[in-house]
Image (spheres, grey):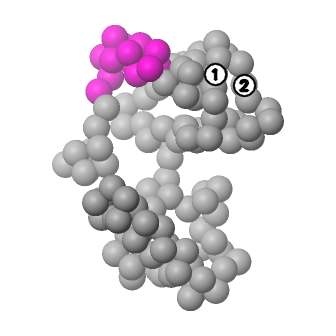
């Protein structure tokens, strides 16, 4: 986003906002900068649009569809890095994530962790 002009940032964010609202009846209010790339200017633009920028505290290389990690090592990496207040970034296009998510959630809960929305997390 830092390379985009202000009008392009606004158009991309608000076009997505409208699609999500229409399809899911949900008003988006959080944004994660793609690739974690941002600048003071992009933060200011998205803030003016009413968004709160949220970064993640855990991510791993799962985004490349042609280079998916094996399920056991991915699950181990995710579970070994759990921590209080974690905002976990798992890419939805990852077949590995799709296959391990249920087991990761169950194991994390067995370890005493809870899952909350960002709205609940802020309180």
Q: Within the image, what quadrant is residue 36 found in?
A: bottom right
101 or 50: which is nearer to us? 101
| Residue 51 marker | none
Q: Position of residue 111 (x, y in %)?
A: 36, 13
Q: Position of residue 62 (x, y in %)?
A: 67, 35
The residue located at (48%, 67%) in the rendering is 16
Q: How many marks?
A: 2
**Relative to residue 22, is residue 10 depicted above or below?**
below
Question: What residue sits 56% from the left and 88% below the top?
Answer: 7
Residue farthest to the front, as pictured: 23
Crowding around mark 2 (Cα neighbors within 10 Å: few <14, some 14 to 19, many 20+) is some
Examine the structure image and report whether residue 75 is included in the region drawn in magenta: no
- Residue 14 in view here: yes
The quadrant in which the N terminus is found is bottom right
Instruction: Identify whether 12 is placed above or below 32.
Output: below
Return the residue at label 1. 74
Q: Quadrant of residue 23?
A: bottom left
Dot placed on the residue nearer the N-terminal end, 1 or 2: 2
What residue lies at 57% left-to-right and 86% top-to-bottom?
6
Seen in the image, is 68 located left or right of residue 105? Answer: right
Would you say 5 lies left or right of 50 here? right
Q: Could you tell me how far apart the alpha carbons at marks 1 and 2 are, in whole angstroms? A: 6 Å
Q: Does residue 109 belong to the magenta stretch?
A: yes
Q: Position of residue 49 (x, y in %)?
A: 39, 79
Q: Are marks 1 and 2 in contact (CB under 8 Å)?
A: yes
Which secondary structure is most common in the magenta stretch?
Answer: helix
Query: Which numbered tag is attached to residue 69?
Result: 2
| Crowd rating for badge 1 (residues with CA inside 10 Å; few <14, some 14–19, many 20+) | some
The span picked out in magenta is 102-114
Q: Is residue 1 left or right of residue 18?
A: right
SS of the residue at dot 1?
helix
């Amino acid at each position: 986003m830092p390379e985009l002009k202000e009008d392009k940032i606004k158009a991309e964010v608000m076009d997505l906002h409208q699609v999500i609202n229409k399809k899911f009846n949900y008003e988006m209010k959080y944004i994660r900068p793609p690739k974690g790339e941002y600048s003071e200017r992009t933060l200011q633009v998205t803030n003016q649009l009413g968004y709160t920028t949220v970064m993640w505290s855990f991510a791993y290389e799962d985004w490349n569809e042609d280079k998916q990690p094996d399920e056991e090592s991915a699950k181990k990496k995710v579970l070994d890095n759990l921590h209080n207040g974690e905002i976990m970034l798992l890419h939805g296009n990852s077949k590995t994530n799709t296959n391990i998510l249920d087991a990761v959630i169950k194991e994390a809960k067995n370890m005493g962790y809870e899952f909350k929305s960002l709205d609940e997390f802020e309180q």
